[in-house]
Amino acid sequence: MRATLLLAAIVAAVVLLPGSASSGRQKPYVLTAVADIGTVYWRYDCVHFSGPEWSLGIRFRGEATTRVSYRAGRLTRRRTLPGNLIWFRFRRDRTQSLSFVQAIEPGTLRARVLAKFNRRDCQSYFPPRLSVQLYPR
């Protein structure tokens, strides 16, 4: 009887929650701005039983072509895109990084953003530990 009531309460809570909250995937939050490149965002999914997952994204500033390398654990993804918003998949890896190379007329701009997530980083007011390095032209 008690297990049935608990199950009914869980089902009711999931049905009554808004779509983004019931899926566990929250809206994106600003993590940092990288000078002359763009804005880095983060989001989390901490509802599923497999454990919390996080995702990084970038909205590029301007039209300069920028090469981006994303690293999380053994996974590495590379993309070359002009001014768009791109997201990388949700991952359980607690350390995730983005590296940027932007070649424009005045020179090459390089940057690296390193995010270290903690299990408690499942609220917008608990952003991950962050390191930003910018290598000027």
Image (spheres, grey):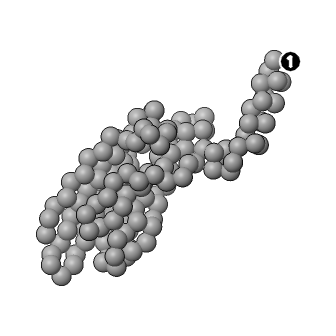
Q: Quadrant of the C terminus?
A: bottom left
- Quarter-wise, where is residue 107 in the image? bottom left
Name the one closer to the observer, 10 or 90. 10
* Three-letter code, disc 1: Met
- In the image, residue 24 above or below residue 64: above
* Residue 80 visible here: no
Q: Residue furthest bottom?
A: 105
Q: Residue at x 63, y 50 (%)?
A: 20
Q: Is 63 positioned to the left or the right of 47 in the image?
A: left
Q: Residue at x 34, y 76 (%)?
A: 62
- In the image, residue 53 above or below residue 99: above
User: x, y percentage for residue 13?
Assistant: 74, 36
Q: Residue at x 28, y 60 (%)?
A: 34
User: x, y percentage for residue 93?
Assistant: 42, 42
Q: Is 23 positioned to the left or the right of 99 in the image?
A: right
- Which residue is the site of mark 1? 1
User: x, y percentage for residue 68?
Assistant: 33, 65
- Quarter-wise, where is residue 98 in the image? bottom left
